[in-house]
Every structure is written in structure tokens, then in C-alpha cells.
Amino acid sequence: MDRLMTTPPLIALPLRLGVNIDHVATLRNARGGPLPDPIRAARLAIEAGADGVTAHLREDRRHIRDEDIARLKAEIDRPLNLEMAATEEMVEIAVRTRPHAACLVPERREERTTEGGIDIVGQHNRLAPVVARLSAAGIRVSMFIAAEPRQIEAAAHIKAPVVELHTGAWCDALAANDSTAADVEWTRIVEGARLAASLGLEVHAGHGLDYTTAETIAALPQVVELNIGHFLVGEAVFAGLSTAIAAMRTAMDRGRARAASRQMREG
């Protein structure tokens, strides 16, 4: 019993999974019309084990639309995480809609997906009022950033309670079989997660994760939530969305359990 009591709570608690439904909306918009319905996908995700739903309302509305956000807020019974640019239009929508969380991301019209973390250091004076306004509306603010010490420290300075570490460079290096680059990026993520937690920030991670990388990162006790979308929607083409999400949940739980077992042996 004493040994169990000494286990840090983060390693023992289940790791939350947020499912991003953007690319269900991308598929719908490619044809026009109402199908496939991203809100149906959100419901299926929750039934399959997702703890929340993420949707990115872009300025050009290329996938998720305003009516999707309104329906998600009204029709799902799990937290809604609204990914958004730090613009006046998006802040007004968030304050009016009141999602559970808002993740601030960089956004360029020509990018296919979010290509990097937001630069809090360089945009401090613009971002701090946005964080304050969203927080005042009761919205938990997350900053999507690279795992760089100065960005993590800047997130704490502007009083954002959550950081989501960008895992894309690590995943890309693994996919390219570049072990040297992958090791460098993994070290940054590990050290970044530790620093963020030491500053009192809640740590999330996401971008490019698949079953294998999600299982690996689940072993980091500081990380309490993964947000995954594109991979799951792609897997759904072959296996079905519910099956893909259940498999992701299993991979995450497996990584978390292995880390807990290791800690018990070392403790």
C-alpha cells in the first residue's frame, strides 16, 4: 500500500484523448452537401472512448464551419476544444459559444495544416490580452507551441493554463527513419514536458501522432492529454472510426501502464 501511495498521480491516471474531427468536415466539403456529418463523427468518437472533441474553425472555413461549432456545443456531452487563430473574429466566436477550451494556433491561408507552434515570445503583447479575455469568459486556454523552453516560459508568463506540445517534427523524423533527428526532437519533448509541469502548466501533446508514437508519448507522466485527428480519420477509411479510436485508446493505455509498471519497479 505504501508503495502505491508514493506513485505520482499523473502516471496513474488515464491519459485523455481528444479526437479532432476537422478532416471529416474536409471530406464533406470536398463534395458539398451535409455528408459525412462531423457531429456524427464526434458522437461516434465519444462512444468509442474519446474524452473530448477538437475542431479548428479556420478563418477561411475550409473544413469546420460556424454551424458545426454551434452544433458541437449543443449536441455533444463531452468537452469541446476549439482550435483557433488569435484574431478578433475568433475570440468573439469563442466568447459567444463558450467551448470548454480554446487552443490558440498559428494560421496561414496557404498552409495545408498547422505547420508549427505559435510564437508567444514574439507575439506576447498581442496574445496576452487574448488569453485574458478568453479566461475571463471561463474558457480554458491552451497554447500550441514547439517544445522550446522560451515558449513554454512565455506561456506561463501570459497565464495560459495549458500548453500543447507540437509533436510533428518528432513524428516526421520517425517516418523518415531519421533516428538522429528523432532522438533530438524526442529529447526536446521530454524536457519540455518536464519544464512545463514544473511551471504549473497542464501539458498536452499532438500533431502527426499514430498508434506507435501515441503509445510512446503516453509514457510521459507530465502529458495528460493527446489530441489526434488526421491519422484516426485516415484509419477510419479502412477500419471504421470507432475501431480506430478504440485501438488508439488501447495504445495510449498500454504506454501509460508500462510507464507505471516501470516506476513501481524503480520505486
Image: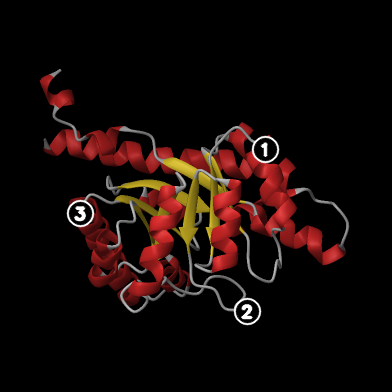
Residue 37 appears left or right of 177: right
Q: Distance between the residues labelled 1 and 3?
A: 34 Å
Q: How far apart are marks 1 and 2 (CA)?
A: 29 Å
Numbered disc 1: secondary structure: helix
Task: Indicate which disc residue 57 carries.
Answer: none
Q: Badge 1: few (under 14), some or many (20 or more) residues near its Cα, within 10 Å?
A: few
**In which quadrant will I find the C terminus?**
top left
Numbered disc 3: secondary structure: loop
For marks 1 and 2, the one nearer the N-term is: 1
Q: Which residue is drawn at 71% across and 50% down?
A: 68
Task: Indicate which disc residue 74 carries.
Answer: 1
Q: How far apart are marks 2 and 3 (CA)?
A: 33 Å
Residue carrying label 3:
199
Amino acid type, callout 3: Leu
Considering depth in this image, is 261 or 168 the residue closer to the camera?
168
Amino acid type, callout 1: Ala
Numbered disc 2: secondary structure: loop
Residue carrying label 2:
109
When the figure is inspected, residue 252 is found, relative to residue 77, above or below; the finding is: below
